[in-house]
Image: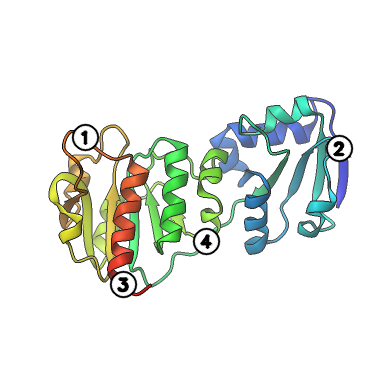
Amino acid sequence: MKRQVISSRGNQHFKHLKKLTESPRYRLEMQQTILDGMHLIESYVERFGSPDSIALIEGGDVDKIAQYLNEDTQVLEFPAGLFSEITPVMSPTGILASINLPHLEAPQKQNCILLLEDIQDPGNLGSILRSACAAGVDLVYLSDQCADIWAPKVLRGGQGAHFYLPCIEKAIFSDVTKAFKGKIFATDLTGKSIYKENLKGPVAFIFGNEGSGLQLETIGLSTQSIYIPMQKGIESLNVSAAVSVCLYEKYRQENVNA
């Protein structure tokens, strides 16, 4: 463990962490991202070992994280003012970690996959990945206009899902659906109630952008359309809520006695 106090914005560690927080392009180039808070750090360490570096507010308790570090981990302490410039949240937890992006292999057997078209809001995307992981989704495909899954706010919303759930960005949906051996459901108001569908066996769900929904050509990739029944006068659910409803209806059908 290498400990260092950082007091200047010109410091290379400060610049690196700030760019990881702010720039998707830099995260991709460096193959790294930022984790905020102990829960995410613990989840990462459990699967992949020690982080590349730990950032603390100056005077923070290093002992509580010592068990997660190795001799090569950089421990960087920042005055509160500088720390607030690298944290991705309004109310800092006081601890960040930089990590190498994990790469999870797609499973051979795929009973449930999720295709996400142009999900823009980082909070929505993080929540969707968290629900997908909990509901047993095997693989998630994201279109090239989705929010960056390694953005700190998406990671915070996912609460560790990224470290267990394989995700493929910039996916070509037509290739995915052509290769998938199972039912493919698109969410569309003209479809059939999800509660009247048999969701047992291999299933793919396609969900669209928060404002505009799915493109017509994307709906055309499905084998059938579904909708979630709602009270009259309600236009739609938030996309993360809609994903949860559909995934857990499949989970319920396949795990009646769970």
Q: Position of residue 58 (x, y in %)?
A: 84, 35
To which quarter of the image does residue 88 belong?
top right
Nearest the camera: 184 or 189? 189
Q: Residue beneath label 3, please?
A: 256
* Callout 2 crowding tier (Cα within 10 Å): few <14, some 14–19, many ≥20: few
Q: Secondary structure at mark 2?
A: loop
Report if the CB atoms under discs 3 and 1 are less than 8 Å apart.
Answer: no
Query: Looking at the image, which residue is at 76% across and 41% down?
Result: 55
Q: Quadrant of residue 209?
A: top left
Q: Is residue 103 above or below residue 128?
A: below
**Residue 130, can we see it?**
yes
Q: Earlier in the sequence, mark 4 or mark 1?
A: 4
- Write down the residue under mark 1: 235
| Residue 211 x/y as whole percent | 29, 32
Q: Label 3 crowding class (10 Å Cα cut-off): few <14, some 14-19, many 20+?
A: few
- Which of the marked residues, 3 or 2, is nearer the chain's N terminus? 2
Residue found at x 82% / y 25%: 8
As drawn, 9 above or below 245: above
Mark 2 and mark 1: Cα distance apart in space: 50 Å
Amino acid on which disc 2 is placed: Gly
Sequence-first disc among 4 and 2: 2
Q: Say whether residue 168 is visible.
A: no
Mark 3–mark 2 distance (CA, rounded to whole Å): 51 Å
The residue wearing badge 4 is 164
Q: For the residues carrying marks 4 and 3, which lies nearer the camera in this image?
A: 3
Q: CA distance from mark 4 to mark 2?
A: 33 Å
Tell me the kind of residue under disc 4.
Answer: Tyr
Task: Give the SS element for disc 3.
Answer: loop
Q: To which residue does mark 2 refer?
A: 59
